[in-house]
Amino acid sequence: MSQKQTARYARRINQVIDHIRRHLDDDLDVARLSELAHFSPFHFHRQFS
């Protein structure tokens, strides 16, 4: 993976982390979080882990 691609993935995951921090009292399901990151739920799970 190129450095540019790695930086894009990091930005997308960081957006999800920011969302989680802002919504700790809400339901946080993988489908919604993967939407925020623009990944499929399967790919999001693999990347986020």
Image (cartoon, rainbow, N blue to C red):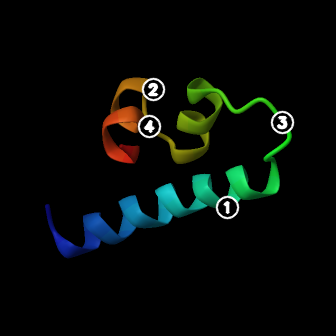
Of all residues, the one furthest to the right in this rendering is 25
Q: Residue at x 58, y 35 (%)?
A: 35
Q: Position of residue 2 (x, y in %)?
A: 15, 68
- Secondary structure state at the residue bearing disc 3: loop
Q: Amino acid at mark 3?
A: Asp
Query: Which residue in the protein does label 1 denote?
Result: 18
Closer to the observer: label 4 or label 1?
A: 1
Alpha-carbon span between mark 2 and mark 4: 6 Å
Determine which of the numbered discs, if any, sits on residue 39 in the image: 4
Q: Amino acid at mark 1?
A: Asp
- Secondary structure state at the residue bearing disc 1: helix
Q: Amino acid at mark 4?
A: Phe
Disc nearer the start of the sequence (4/1): 1
Give yes or no for contact between labels 2 and 4 (Cβ–Cβ under 8 Å).
yes
Disc nearer the start of the sequence (4/3): 3
Closer to the observer: label 2 or label 3?
A: 3
User: In the rendered image, which quarter is residue 26 located in?
Assistant: top right
Disc nearer the start of the sequence (2/1): 1
Q: Residue at x 61, y 43 (%)?
A: 36
